[in-house]
Image (cartoon, rainbow, N blue to C red):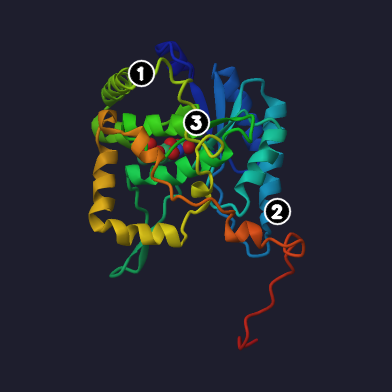
Amino acid sequence: MRRAKQAVAVPIIGSLNGVSTGGWIEFAKKIQQAGADAFELNIFYVPTDPALTAAQVERMYVDLVRDVKAGVSIPVAVKLGPAFSALANLARHLDVVGADGLVLFNRFYLPDFDLERLEVTPRLALSHPHELLLRLHWVALLHGHVKADLAVTGGVHGSAQVLKSMMAGARVAMMTSALLEHGIRHLGRVRGDLLDWMEAHEYASIMQMQGTMSYRSVAEPAAFERANYMKVLSSRRACGTGCASAAMSRDRTSSSSTDRRAEASSGSPTSRPSWFASNLTSSSRQELPPPSPPRGRRR
Ligand SMILES: Cc1cc2nc3c(=O)[nH]c(=O)nc-3n(C[C@H](O)[C@H](O)[C@H](O)COP(=O)(O)O)c2cc1C
């Protein structure tokens, strides 16, 4: 951290993956003392214990952020995974304890196994722009609901993905795989493409576009709720297989081919609350009972 601060003029954000609360706080303080401008908690935690409830896991996240915030004075961002049953609620709790940023989402590296040697093998795959969609979806949903700045990480490869992240409501778009693939000079190209697109589409600043495609701003907010419903499935029949591959190759191109208006109108035309929201009765809002063993299982 000290060497990085001496070498460059841009702000440096320290990132930490810890295990115990004591360890997180101790290292967070050290990173601050070394000159970090901000700090990211990368909570890479897989709750494998079946006795652990979702509420307990979320409580651990919230307590950790509150404790780390109390130990440092620099801004603290939290990098989250997507696998929460009530992400918006967790985001709100993290907001309340003072998280300055939410980084969406951690990519969990999934081990494969070798069929011949019957060994689990680690596999590091770089990201694909298609991974951006999950991030866009959640940034668009959370924008305006939390005070914390939102950052997108996962699938940002070019200026098109940066623009989409900003329009969904992010303040930050992060890039790792693309820089590993194309080298550090890629950043200059992305910046150039971004400025060209903004000039061609008459945007004077990034701020002007931030959140313009968020849940709150689009004409069809219900389209954001329909992650996998009948309309989405039938849109594939109407479109044929060519549409999906065309969309993927468009995502890989530079920002100059991004057409904001076409994408803004791609939501489906009806506006209804989702089935899940309208069927959430007061009894289903109560805490779930402990699951009973499956029928027929031998004891
Ligand atoms: C080689 C490699 C090392 C990484 N190391 C870290 C790390 O130490 N901490 C972290 O929070 N994320 C780490 N990541 C995840 C990235 O920060 C990022 O969230 C992820 O790669 C998705 O973004 P991308 O599509 O821009 O690659 C790493 C990713 C790669 C490919």
Badge 2 amino acid: Ala
The residue where tag 3 is placed is 170
For the residues carrying marks 2 and 3, which lies nearer the camera in this image? 3
Q: x and y percent of residue 213 in the render?
A: 47, 35
Q: Is residue 298 left or right of residue 248?
A: right
For image coordinates 28% across by 70% down, the residue present is: 116
Label 3, ligand 1: CB separation under 8 Å: no
Q: In the rendered image of this protein, does residue 203 appear above or below residue 52?
A: above
Q: x and y percent of residue 273 in the render?
A: 59, 54
Q: x and y percent of residue 117 in the render?
A: 31, 68
User: Residue 239's quadrant in the figure?
Assistant: bottom left
Q: Residues within 10 Å of mark 1 (few under 14, many from 20)?
A: few
Answer yes or no: is residue 176 visible.
Answer: no
Badge 1 amino acid: Glu
The residue where tag 2 is placed is 55
**Helix, strand or loop status at disc 1:** loop
The residue where tag 1 is placed is 202
Q: x and y percent of residue 54 in the render?
A: 66, 56
In space, the residues marked 2 and 1 are separated at their CA atoms by 46 Å
Answer yes or no: is residue 49 visible.
Answer: yes
Q: Along the polypeptide, which appears first: circle 2 or circle 1?
A: 2
Label 2, ligand 1: CB separation under 8 Å: no
User: Residue 155's quadrant in the figure?
Assistant: top left
Q: Are marks 3 and 1 in contact (CB under 8 Å)?
A: no
For image coordinates 63% across by 65% down, the residue present is: 50
Q: Residues within 10 Å of mark 3 (few under 14, many from 20)?
A: many
In space, the residues marked 3 and 1 are separated at their CA atoms by 20 Å
Q: Along the polypeptide, which appears first: circle 2 or circle 3?
A: 2
For image coordinates 67% across by 39% down, the residue present is: 92
**Which numbered disc covers residue 249?**
none
In space, the residues marked 2 and 3 are separated at their CA atoms by 27 Å
For the residues carrying marks 3 and 1, which lies nearer the camera in this image? 1
